[in-house]
């Protein structure tokens, strides 16, 4: 039987906060006749806590709707300091042992029916799995979620440091030697090819268009007011790269407008953001919620916010799942992300875009969207839903994944 082993340190199921790409890919492949195993860390990136493993327990295996899911213990971390590196190493080490034992239990002929799909940014884990695939003649696919280590370099890491040099070397080998490379962002395809990859496919992040249902914009009787404010929601990580301080500054600028900002999630920058917003009445912070509860929440919004730090790599190398959930829900987008995302939103009339790193302009476009006629905002939402169904449907993406890895098995 054809098997695919999916590895992503931060993979989640729908009852958890965070992205669920690996879960939805696994379910889609099972429906197409694959036997699927997923390996991930039990340390939830959004909440920064262990969700399943009891003290001293190293791993837990579960059957989740036919998916064999293995949760692994890692060294935890709260901030992006040295403990984050130890976190990578711990996941790579435990994963390597578990996967190697699983491979050795198989007969040689059965190994030919396996594809290992390793999803970045955790390059050490992907690199170790490629070594196993090379030694045991197993097909290997690299999925590029975030462009590591380029995002670290653009964010200020020293390109000449030992850690960055090791990651650059791993990246080069993985691009050269993988049987296929899957890019989530169309903007990184040329970068990956220049690094030596031969078979590169674009399979973007997407949305479950059944779960993230389309709904009309919430009703406002006579325009927006303090009793019925324009609700702008950000749902996702509260990290340095997300640049959420721009939302706080926009809230300061718009404090006298009938606009409410709702930020849902957690991360290392949340305490700083809470302190920065403590005197504002037009902004609310909430804890992370599970993916399955997200569609209902987004249906209450008038607009979805997407913010990222002004880094070169973010202009071409990101594919945020929260963006496609917003598309699928039929909500206008306000973003400060430049490059491919900005062009897509402007070309398809999906919302409004602001200059990166410019809170005054960010506030201006939010207010501009709020003041736009309902018919204009509604058209943006309908355009977004059409794009979700046409390009970013998880069903279509899973079908393409099935074809790619099926072709590897028969080679």
Image: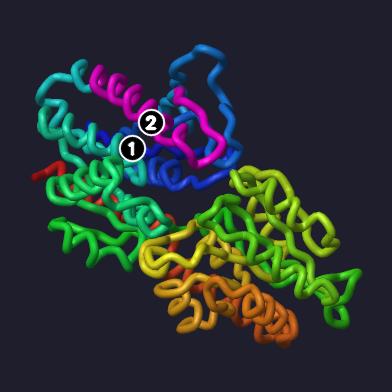
From the viewer's side, name the closer residue of 97 and 326: 97
Q: Secondary structure at mark 2?
A: strand
Q: Bin the neighbour count of mark 2 within 10 Å (Cα to Cα): few under 14, some 14-19, many 20 and up.
A: many
In this view, 393 is above or below 265? below
Q: Position of residue 387 (x, y in %)?
A: 47, 72
Query: Which quarter of the rendering shows the C terminus?
Result: top left
Q: Name the image quarter holding residue 67.
A: top left
Residue positioned 22% across, 59% down in the render: 192
From the viewer's side, name the closer residue of 174 and 159: 159
Q: Position of residue 57 (x, y in %)?
A: 49, 14
Q: Position of residue 112 (x, y in %)?
A: 13, 32
CB within 8 Å, label 1 to label 2: yes
Residue positioned 13% across, 50% down in the render: 176
Residue located beneath label 2 in the image: 39
Q: Is residue 15 visible?
A: no
Q: Bin the neighbour count of mark 1 within 10 Å (Cα to Cα): few under 14, some 14-19, many 20 and up.
A: many
Q: Which residue is farthest top?
A: 56
Residue located beneath label 1 in the image: 6
């Amino acid at each position: 039987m054809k098997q695919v082993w999916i590895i992503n340190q931060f993979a989640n199921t729908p009852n958890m906060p965070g992205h669920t790409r690996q879960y939805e890919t696994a379910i889609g492949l099972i429906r197409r006749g694959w036997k699927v195993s997923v390996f991930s860390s039990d340390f939830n990136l959004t909440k920064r806590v262990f969700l399943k493993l009891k003290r001293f327990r190293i791993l837990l295996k579960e059957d989740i709707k036919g998916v064999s899911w293995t949760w692994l213990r890692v060294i935890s971390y709260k901030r992006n300091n040295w403990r984050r590196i130890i976190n990578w190493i711990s996941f790579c080490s435990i994963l390597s042992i578990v996967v190697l034992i699983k491979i050795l239990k198989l007969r040689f002929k059965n190994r030919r029916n396996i594809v290992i799909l390793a999803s970045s940014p955790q390059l050490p884990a992907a690199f170790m799995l490629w070594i196993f695939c090379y030694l045991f003649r197993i097909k290997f696919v690299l999925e590029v979620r975030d462009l590591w280590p380029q995002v670290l370099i653009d964010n200020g890491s020293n390109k000449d440091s030992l850690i960055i040099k090791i990651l650059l070397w791993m990246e080069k080998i993985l691009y050269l030697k993988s049987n296929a490379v899957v890019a989530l962002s169309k903007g990184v395809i040329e970068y990956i090819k220049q690094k030596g990859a031969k078979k590169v496919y674009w399979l973007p992040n997407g949305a479950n268009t059944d779960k993230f249902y389309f709904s009309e914009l919430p009703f406002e009787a006579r325009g927006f007011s303090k009793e019925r404010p324009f609700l702008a929601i950000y749902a996702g990580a509260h990290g340095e790269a997300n640049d959420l301080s721009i939302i706080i500054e926009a809230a300061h600028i718009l404090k006298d407008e009938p606009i409410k900002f709702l930020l849902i999630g957690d991360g290392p920058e949340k305490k700083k953001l809470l302190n920065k917003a403590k005197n504002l009445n037009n902004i609310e912070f909430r804890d992370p919620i599970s993916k399955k509860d997200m569609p209902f929440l987004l249906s209450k919004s008038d607009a979805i916010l997407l913010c990222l730090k002004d880094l070169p790599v973010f202009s071409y190398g990101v594919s945020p799942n929260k963006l496609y959930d917003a598309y699928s829900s039929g909500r206008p987008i306000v973003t400060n992300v430049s490059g491919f995302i900005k062009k897509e939103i402007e070309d398809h009339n999906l919302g409004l875009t602001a200059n990166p790193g410019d809170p005054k302009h960010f506030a201006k476009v939010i207010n501009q969207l709020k003041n736009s006629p309902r018919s204009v905002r509604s058209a943006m939402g309908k355009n977004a839903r059409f794009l979700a169904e046409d390009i970013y449907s998880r069903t279509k993406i899973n079908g393409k994944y099935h074809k790619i890895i099926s072709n590897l098995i028969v080679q």
